[in-house]
Image (spheres, rainbow, N blue to C red):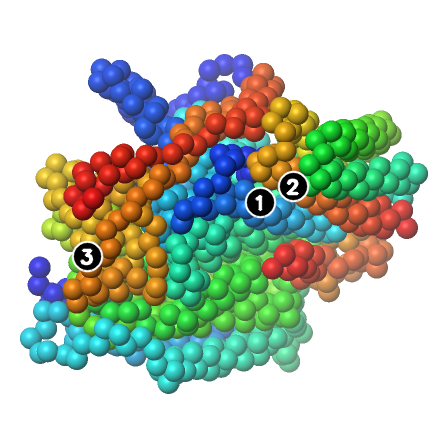
Amino acid sequence: MKYKGWFLRAAAFLPLALMTFLLSGCADVVVLNPKGEIAKHQLDLIYITTGLCLIIIVPVLILTFWIAWKYRVKSKKKEAYQPEWDHSTKLEAVWWGVPILIILLIAIVTVQYSYKLEPSKALASDNKPITIQVVALDWKWLFLYPEQGIATVNYVQFPEKVPVQFQLTADAPMNSFWIPQLGGQIYTMSGMAMKLHLIADEPGDYFGTGANFSGEYFGKMTFNAKATSQADFDKWVQDVKQSYPAMSQEGYNELAQPATSLVRSFSAFPNGMFDNIVNKYVVAGEGHHHGGEAASSQNDAAAKDDQDTSKTDMSGIDMSDAGHSDAAHQH
Amino acid sequence: MANVAANHSSHDHDHGHDGHHDLEALRTMGFWIFIITDCIIFGTLFATYAVLMNSTAGGPTGAELFEMPGVIAETFILLTSSFTSGLAVLSMNRGDKKGLIGWLIVTALLGASFITLEVTEFLKMIDEGAKISTSAFLSAFYTLVGTHGIHVSIGLIWMIALMLQVAKRGITPVTKRKIGNISLYWHFLDVVWIFVFTIVYMMGVR
Amino acid sequence: MKITKLSDFFVTGDPLIYGADVAIGLTMVAIVVALTAFKRWGWLWREWLTTVDHKRIGIMYVIASLLMLFRGGVDALLMRTQLALPDSMEFLKPDHYNDIFTTHGVIMILFMAMPLMFGLFNLTVPLQIGARDVAFPLLNSLSFWLFFMGAMLFNVSFVIGGSPEAGWLAYPPLSEKMFSPGVGQDFYIWGIQISGIGSLMTGINFIVTILKMRAPGMKLMKMPMFTWSVLSSCLTIILAFPILTVTLALLFIDRYFGAHFFTLDMGGNPMMYINLIWMWGHPEVYIVVLPAFGIFSEIVATFSKKRLFGYGSMVFALMSISIFSFFTWAHHFFTMGSGANVNAFFAVTTMIIAIPTGVKIFNWLFTMYKGKITFELPMLWTMAFIPCFIVGGMTGVMLSVAPADFQFHNSYFLIAHFHQVLIGGVVFGYFAGLYYWWPKVFGFKLNDKLGKWAFWLWNIGFYVCFMPQYVLGLMGMTRRVSSYSWDTGWWSWNFVSTIGGFLMGIGFLFQVWQILHSIKFMERVKGDPWGGRTLEWSIPSPAPFYNFAITPKVEGRDDWWRRKELAAKGVQDPPPKYEPIHMPKNSGTPIVMSLFWFILGFGFVFDWLWLIVPGAIGIAATMLYHSFNYDTDYYVTVDEIKKTEAKAGRVV
C-alpha cells in the first residue's frame, strides 16, 4: 500500500466537495439564486457564516494532511520524535481562543439577523401588502385570498415588489411552507395561525414545496408560486372570478379529504373560512396560539374573544424551565 | 425496575485481598443513580402536567374534581409511612429483626391504605365522567398521579418480598443493603408526593 | 386490533416482503437444524445466552449491531434506488418508501449505533480500568437482552402487522391513532421502549463501574481517554433516556387509552412532543459520538507512539459537550415560530458546542505532531474521520445559524450534514474501535488488504453519496420525498448520490468478507499487537474470563507503556502471588425476563390481553425469583488461575 496514493486521493476529495459547492451557481440551485429580499438576506448570512467557518476549516485541513505526511514512519527524512511532549499552554490557548472568537462573531451576526429576519415581522415597502392565507391539507396546499375573495389549490400568484403576508395553518398533520427563492420556511400547524412575510423582487415562477413530512403522498405537495406585475395579477383575479366555480363548505370538506390534487381555482369561498379552520382545533376558553401570532380575525368576532383569553403557548422556553429546573438540581 | 438494579448478592464473609470491591456499596450507589433517573421521569411528567394543566377542553377542572379531605388524608398516611420506614431502618441498625419486620408491616399497611384511597378517588372521578380521554388536563393528571401510584404499588410488592427474606436470612450485609434501598425508594416517593400534592392538588383547587 | 383474516396479521402484497418472509423462515430453520445436528443447544445456552461475562456480552452486542447495520443499509439502498428513478418509475410505492425511511432511521440510530457503542463499552472499559467485570454483571446481561428483544420486536413489524411510517421520531399528530391507525406505530413505541430501558441500565452500570471499580492507583485524571468518554456518554444517557421513556409512554397512552397529550383535539399539544423528543434526541447524538471521540484519542496516541496531547483539555471538552448537549434541543425546530429570542438563544448554545469539538481535533493533530505515525487500519479510519468531521461540523455551524436554517431545515442539506457527522464521526469511529480492539477480543488480526479495500470503498462512497446531497438541499429538495419530477433538475445529483450509496454497500460486503477470511486464515497475535499504552494490552488476547490474574497497581497515565519502558530498562516484575478470584455465576434470568418483555410488548401492539397478562406476570415473577436467589457467585481457585495463565503462555 503506497501512502502517496492515499494522500493524493484524499486531497482530491476536498476540491471535489468544494467544486460541487461552487458549481451550484446555476439557476436550479434555488437557495443560492434568490429572487426576494428575505432570501437575499438569508443568502448573505449563509455566505458570511460560511466564510467565517472557512477561516478555521481550511488551515485545519491543510494542517491535518501536512502533519500526517511529515511525521509518518516511512518518511525518508528523520523528523524530531518527542513521545513525552503532551502539553503546551500557549498552543492550547490559541486553539481555545481562536474558535471562541470566530463563534462569537458568528453568534453576533446570527442574533442580529434573528431579529431582522423574524418571519412574523412586516416588511417595509411603499406598496400596500397583500394577505394570502395558506392551509396545509393532506397532501395539497389551499390558498385563500381574503381581499380578492378567490381561492386556489397547489398554485399561488401575487404581484411583484409587493410584500406578501402569508397567514398559515394546517387542517392535517403539521407541515412546513417553503418557497426557497423568496425566503425560508415556516411550520404550518393546526390550531395556530403562523405569519410569514415574503416579497418577490421580480416576476417569475418560483418553486414551492411542503417541507415537513405529513404522510403518504407528502412528496406531491409542491406548488408553483408565480409573481407577476400588478396589472397581470388583477387580470388573473378577474379571470378566476369569472370562469371558476365557488367553493362551498361541503366543497372544502371534500377537498380536505386525504388525497393528492391537481391545480384548482375557485371564484369564492365561505366567509371567515381560515379562522374557522384555525379555531376548529382551539377549544373555547384556552389558548393554542403562539404568542403574538393569533389568527387575524377580520371577519370572526368569536376568534377575538378567544385571543383575549389565550395564554402563551409553550414554545420551548417555558417548557425548558419546567423540564430543566428538575434536571438541574440533580447534578 | 428498581429491584432489578440492586439485586445481586454476594458471600457475606468479607475477604480483604486487593481488588475486592465492596459489592453492597456498589449496589447502593447504583440504586442512587436509578433514583436520579426516576427523578427525571417524574420531572418530565410534572413538566407535561404544567403545560397541559389548563387544557381542560371545556371538561371538568381540577377545582371541580379534587376533594381535598381525601387527598390530605392520603398525604398524612404516606408521610407517616415514610416515618415508620425510617423506624424500620433504625431497628435494623440496632440488630432488632422483630422490630424491623414489625415496622415494615406497619409501613406496608399504610402504603396499601394510601393506594386504596387513591384508587377510590380515581374510580369516583371516572364515575363522574372525568376519564383519561376527557381532556389533555385529565390525561396529564392520571398519568402523573398514576405513575406515582404504580411506583408505590411496586414498592409494596418489593417490601413484602424483603420481609420474607429478612425473616428467612436475618440481618446480613445483603438484606441490610436491600432494606436501605427500599427505604430510600420510599422516602423518594414521599418527596415526589409532596410535589404532587402542591402542584396538582393545591394549585388545582385554587 | 381485531384479526379477522390472515392478511390483517401478516404484511402482504409486496414481492419484497414475501422474499423477506421466505429468507427469515429459511434462516431460522437453518439455525435450528444446525444447532440440533451439532448438538450445540446446551453449549449455546450455557456459554452465551446465560453469560454474564462482559466480553461475551460485548461480542453479542457487536454481532447484533452488524446484523442491524445490514438491515438499515438495505433500507438505505432501497431508498437510494427509488430516488435514482424520478417520476413514473415507481420502484417503491410512497407508503412503502415511508416505511423504509422510518425503519432506516430508527434502526441505524437505536439498533445499530447504540448496540455497537455498548459492545465497545463492554469489550473495553473493564479491561482499561483493570477491573474483573462491570459493577453489575447480571444487569449488564439484562441490558443486552432487553435491547435484543426490543430490536426483534421492532423488526417483526416488517413481516407482521406493518412497519411504522411516521418518520424516525414519529411526530404527532401524524403518529397518533387519527392518522396512523395501524399497529406499526405501536411496534415503534414498544421496540424502542424496551431497548431504551436496557440502554438506561447500561448507563447506570458503567457509571458505577468507572467510578468505583478502577484498579488501585488509577485516579480519575489517570484514566484512559476512552473511559472518560464512556463516562461522559453514560452521564448523558442517564439524564436523557428517562425523557425518552416518558415521551414514548405518553404517546402510547394517547394511542392505547385515547388520552390527549399530543392529539389535535381536546387540548392536546403536538408541539410538546417535538420538544420532549428532542430533549432526548439531541443529547442522544452526543451520546453516540462522545465514545467515538474517546476511541480516536486512544488510537491517535497508540499509532503516533506518543502521549495524548492536552489530556486536561480533552476531559474538559468531553464534559462540557455532554452538559451543553442538553441546552440545544430547540435548534431542531427553529421554524416553529417561537420568536427571535428563543431562536437566538438556541442558535448560540448550539454554536458553542463547536468550540470544544474543535479543540479536540487540534489536540489529536498535535498528538500526531512529532510522533512516529504508522497507518494501520484503525489509524486509517481515524485519518478519514478528521477531514470528514471537520466539514460536517462546519455545515453544522451553518445550520445552527437560525435565520439561515429557515432555508436549510428539513432539506437534503440537513440530511447530508447529519450523515456526515454520524457516518464520518460515529460509524468511522466505531469501525476504528472494532479494528483496534478486535485482536484483543478474539486473539487474531483482521486481514489488512481486504480492510483497505473496505476502507476506500466506504470513504469514496461516502463523499460520492453525500456531497451531492448538500447541493440537492440547496436546490430545494426536501427530505422524505419519495419521488420527484424530471423538471426539478434533481435527477443527476440523485443518481450520483445513489452510486455512492452502493459503493458504501460494497464496502460493507468487503468487511463481511474480511471477517470471514480472517477467521479462516487466523493470524494469531500476542497480548499487545499494536504497541498499546493502556491496561487492556497488558493481558493475553483473548483475555481470560477473569481478565486480570492479579489486579494491576497503576502509577500513571498510559500505565502499560510505563511498565514496558521499565521492563526495557531491565526492571523485573516480582513473581505473581495468586489469590482466589470472586466471580459472578451465569444466569438465565435476564433472557427469560426479556422474553416476557417481548411477549408483553407484542400483546400491547395487538391489544391482546391474553398475551399482556402473562407477559406482565412473567416479568414480575422473574424479578421476584431473582430477588430471592442468594446463590449468585463463586470463587475461582488458585489452581485454575495458574492453569489458565499457563495456557495463555504466561509465567506462572
Q: Residue at x 27, y 34 (%)?
A: C640
Name the residue type under label 1: Thr
Q: Is residue C242 above or below residue B166?
A: below
For the residues beneath circles 2 and 1, the answer to whether they share a chain is yes
> Which chain is disc 1 placed on?
B
Is disc 3 in contact with disc 1, using a CB cutoff of under 8 Å? no
Q: Is residue C348 above or below residue C38?
A: below
**Which one is closest to the eye, mark 2 or mark 3?**
2
Q: Whole-percent x and y of residue A101?
A: 46, 82
Is disc 2 in contact with disc 3, using a CB cutoff of under 8 Å? no
Q: Whole-percent x and y of residue C396?
A: 43, 65
Dot 2 lies on which element? helix
Rendered image: mark on residue A111: none
Q: Is residue C62 above or below residue B98?
A: below
- Between residues C603 and C573, which one lies in front from this camera angle? C573
> Which chain is disc 2 placed on?
B
Q: Residues within 10 Å of mark 1 (few under 14, many from 20)?
A: some
Q: Whole-percent x and y of residue A179?
A: 50, 62
> Which chain is disc 3 placed on?
C
Q: Residue at x 68, y 28 (%)?
A: B163
For the residues beneath circles 3 and 1, the answer to whether they share a chain is no
Which residue has dot 2 on it? B180
**Which one is closest to the eye, mark 3 or mark 1?**
1
Rendered image: mark on residue B28: 1
Rendered image: mark on residue C530: 3
Name the residue type under label 2: Gly
- Between residues C131 and A297, which one lies in front from this camera angle? C131
Name the residue type under label 3: Trp
Q: Cα distance, mark 3 to mark 1?
A: 39 Å
